[in-house]
Amino acid sequence: MSYHVNEKGYYGNFGGAYIPEMLYPNVEELRSKYLKIIHEPDFKQEFELLLKDYVGRPSPLYLAHRLSERYGAKIFLKREDLNHTGAHKINNTIGQILLAQRLGKKRIIAETGAGQHGVATATVCALKGLECVVYMGEVDIERQAPNVARMKMMGATVIPATSGSKTLKDATNEAMRDWINNPVDTHYIIGSVVGPHPYPDMVARFQSIISEETRWQLKEKTGTESADYVLACVGGGSNAVGMFYHFLEDEQVKLIAVEAAGKGVHSGKSAATTALGREGVLHGSRSILMQTNDGQVVEPYSISAGLDYPGIGPQHAHLHTIKRAQYVNITDDEALKAGLLLAQLEGIIPAIESAHALAYLEKMKFKGETVVVCLSGRGDKDLATYMNYFGLG
Amino acid sequence: MNRLQTLFKEKKDPILSIYFTAGYPDLNSTLDIAEALEKAGADFLEIGFPYSDPVADGPVIQNSSQKALENGMTLNLLFEQLRDLRKRVSIPVLLMGYVNPVLQYGVENFCHAAAEAGIDGVIVPDLPMYEYEELYRNCFEQHQLSNIFLVTPQTVEDRIRKIDDLSNGFIYLLSSSATTGKNLAVSTDTESYFARIKAMKLKNPTMIGFGISDKESFNKAAQYTRGAIVGSAFMKLLGAPDYLSRIPKFIQSLKN
């Protein structure tokens, strides 16, 4: 059983490139060149150097003592929150900006939900002196104001997406429309493992550094590069794919992907895609998505802007279908409590996205197993939400 | 031969096609609009079935799609409305929309219902060529449905040839790589693109769409191809309360 993309761009039944002809030349250019470019020694050297000196990799694998004690397991946190810009998103934007340069592109566009990918894109555009336009849902602009300010300070133009639910899905639509209207000099840096082939595979490769490091770090700390459980949160699913990537073939490792249940899976306000969705096509690939019987995409809901998306990447749809990973969900309330718990037990304030993965520990039973949780981002951007929720203001 | 193929075979004058979104502005206006368009002199029609995330469309068709969905339009309902299509309309009619609603309806069911209603062809902009060949082509051909592919100024020659091989109605030339509803800016670049396609002597006829909004852009399109498709400009007219009575004048303003 293969866990990776085949030569047609599919993971089992999922994936492909469902795009209008206007996007075909750009996507085809990328498809035909991405593997060659990312394997060039000059690309690898620059990518690795930037990850080390600019991003600050390797990110620590931290044994969370008090958290471990509470749950009766050996819990390691993969500290993507310590990366420059505060989340795993920068691994991918560094990769894609180097690729865009080698394709001769002059202008970069991106979509963003929580603003982490937007910030990571604005950052690499400043680094390379390229024009940057970020589409962000109007609702998200409001709830993630600090990230909007960061993007603007680095010279990016932030354009509000005002259609539909005014969140990540709509920002993605607007970015795709921009790419259609700018077919020659623009590269679209998609922030997750979604979109037409080759995006899901390309982004997964750039994010796979997370599990690559985790394996040698585990070996150093525990004597074996394997673990019993690996957990990550899933919106589109880029930190989860990066966290799972080098564990996929290590079949004894149980992979757990945590979706956002919002106010409850059956509350009508949820983003738990695998629980609520069916096969369908959104944003250029065939995957699992939340939709009506008529095939209209349903507006998702989560308190976490980064998980507020009605689909998942096609590789996740595949891993879910073949049961290589288990897909579970966590409500807003459970996630916020887990965020507070980590702050008070370990002195680490997690992004609400990552807090969903932490919250699932509460539902598991342990007998000293080794567990890795991807701490995909830091919670600075979410302080207002935490403060309001817990009445700490 | 379906009605669309017959039209391209027999008609000598430039061909005018009109697009409109089913369920907009009123849920049950689909056949009234279709009938009025035929009477006014449109040569064939593209009836859009709405989708929540129309990435290839600009604001006008985004809004009409959203309004149609709010009104309650679904593919099921559209096929119900189309049961009387052939009692009221004799010109070729195509369905146009995104792939996900078709997938949920079921490809077989969709082809069957379309053929039953007297539909002649389908335009699904986000259905890729590979998937069309593998999964859709047989079903479309069995039901005499012409599948219409899009070509942009950036589409390379090999791919245009391949599209020509797979097509059995016409090829939809986009005036530029753009979302719908932008005005056609005729430059030497667009003219040389139209001329380049014309010189390829494709087996299938071509039509130009995206940005055709008046007599001038229609005539320009007809110089290089068999005619043109008008979408957003017509959808704007449907925003007026007395839209049905405005249709004859609108068609005349394009054609004569």
Image (tube, coloured by chain):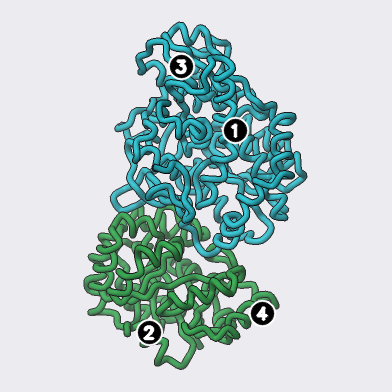
- Kindly check if marks 1 and 4 are in contact, taking CB atoms under 8 A apart as contact: no
In the rendered image of this protein, does residue B7 appear above or below residue B156? below
Q: Identify the residue position indicated by label 4 in the image.
A: B192
Where residue A391 sits in the image (x, y, percent)?
49, 14
In this view of the protein, can residue A344 be seen by the observer?
no
Q: Which residue is mark 3?
A: A370
Mark 3 or 4: the one toward you: 3
Distance from the alpha carbon under mark 1 to that under mark 2: 55 Å
User: Where on the picture, by quarter, is residue B4?
Assistant: bottom left
Q: Tell if the residue under mark 3 belongs to the same chain as the one under mark 2.
A: no
What separation in Å lies between label 3 and label 1 (alpha carbons)? 20 Å
User: Residue B14, image x and y in percent?
Assistant: 49, 87
**Amino acid type, mark 3:** Thr
Marks 1, 2 in one chain: no
Can you tell which mark lies on residue A209? Answer: 1
Local crowd size for mark 2, using a 10 Å CA cut-off: few (<14), some (14–19), many (≥20):
some
- Residue under pointer 2: B5
Q: Are marks 1 and 4 on the same chain?
A: no
Amino acid type indicated by mark 2:
Gln
Which secondary structure lies at badge 3?
A: strand
Which element type, helix, strand or loop, lies under badge 1?
A: helix
Find out whether the residues at labels 2 and 4 contact each other: C-beta distance under 8 Å.
Answer: no
Q: Residue at x 47, y 12 (%)?
A: A74
The numbered mark, 3 or 1, whose residue comes first in the sequence reads 1
Q: Residue at x 61, y 39 (%)?
A: A92
Distance, label 3 to label 2, CA atoms, is 66 Å
What is the C-alpha distance between the residues marked 1 and 4? 47 Å
Q: Which sits earlier in the primary sequence, circle 2 or circle 4?
A: 2
Distance from Cα at disc 2 to Cα at disc 4 = 27 Å
Q: Which residue is at a point 36% across and 51% down the rendered structure image?
A: A296
